[in-house]
Amino acid sequence: MIKIGILGGGQLGYMFLQNALQYPCEISILDPAADAPCAPHAHHFVQGDFKDYDTVVKFGENLDAIGIEIEHVNVDALRYLKSIGKKVVPDPEALAIIQDKGVQKEFYVNNNIPTAPYFELNNWEDFKNLETVTYPIFQKSKKDGYDGKGVQFLKSEADLSKILQAPSIFETPADLDREIAVVTVADHLGNIVIYPTVEFVMNEEYNLLDYLLIPSSLSKEVTDRAEKIARDVVKGLNSPGVFAVEMFLNKDQSIWVNETASRVHNSGHSTIEAAYSSQFDQMLRTLMELPLGSTKLFTTSAMVNLIGAENQTGSAEIQNIEKLLEIPGTFLHWYAKAITKPGRKMGHVTLVNDDIEQLKQNIEQVNTTVKVVAKK
């Protein structure tokens, strides 16, 4: 029986486990939190720091394959484990590119991948001394950013007090029509499969993600270009694994790659219900060196994040869960996080329906009736 280890025990690892436990494999999880969502469910759970070299090496030395559910792990330890014959997915060299946004942007430029114009500063204070800066501009810390963390939008010089005190890239904002993503999977033989393009539908009133839609409502010409770009990114990374290539579709219909996640991703969650083989199934297949699954969809679907409500911190519960489950074609995914906080991802809802107008009505019903709050 193959022994697989995953660095990270959060919601992505939790959904990976739900699929992996159906296969003849033994799963170990490494996470710093004793109450990580994966802790009660893995064959073996190790509490430890996945950023620490010795901890990662000790964790992986008796395993056959090692994967990740978060990028911020010790790459040097993974390089060593690969050198002693362990299968590491994604390849440590691909992960090293993804971990540093400056290196990642350089990778796009060197591989002729369209991306936003940018410059890089290792000393953030140098930004104040630049002779010409065109505002607005995005600042993104080179390392450790995710889910909007490590990003600052500087509208003018008046925002300089908000500048992130870290080595950063500074990026020209997109003339945005909408955000899209393509989840792409590569195996150890270089075969690549691609899921249909995902569309991020925004709530313009609050400037927040409303829902993800797959397949997107965009033209075939646009989605064909997006999927070719995603394929080119993954070919350039030269690594097995699941990769979510996030992109900006500009108003002139040009496409810029925003960033790539070298792991399963929020934009692929609805593949659990809507596709022949989910992104989590594909993750396991890459680790076990099994043939890649079909990315064909059964139906149109949407994914709505369940976010901790404002002014709510404490033991988590879902308000109006019974109303949620009355909606036809609804699938609840609860991430088993004990504590809710404002803005924290606590779960998601997948909705499936071939009738796009009915699907949108069901999404609205979820958004207006369901909340994650702290128990009173």
Image: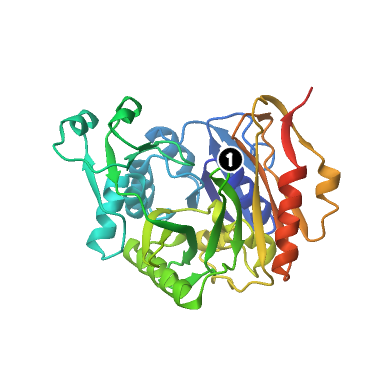
Quadrant in which the C terminus appears? top right
Q: Is residue 265 left or right of residue 20?
A: left
Q: How is the image coloured?
A: rainbow
Residue 185: image x %, image y %?
Answer: 48, 65
In this view, the residue farthest toward the left is 131
Residue 5: image x %, image y %?
Answer: 53, 47
Q: Is residue 220 above or below residue 38?
A: below
State the residue at coordinates (58%, 71%). Answer: 295
Q: Nearer the viewer, residue 324 or 50?
A: 324
Q: Is residue 213 left or right of residue 79?
A: right
State the residue at coordinates (64%, 68%). Answer: 275
In this view, the residue farthest toward the bottom is 221
State the residue at coordinates (64%, 72%). Answer: 297
Q: Quadrant of residue 342?
A: top right
In the rendered structure, which amino acid carries the disc numbered 1? Gly
Residue 20: image x %, image y %?
Answer: 64, 55
Q: Is residue 125 above or below residue 50?
A: above
The residue pinned by badge 1 equals 10
Secondary structure under tag 1 reads: loop
Q: Is residue 305 left or right of residue 194?
A: right
Q: Quadrant of residue 214?
A: bottom right
Residue 66 seen by the camera: yes
Q: Residues within 10 Å of mark 1 (few under 14, many from 20)?
A: many
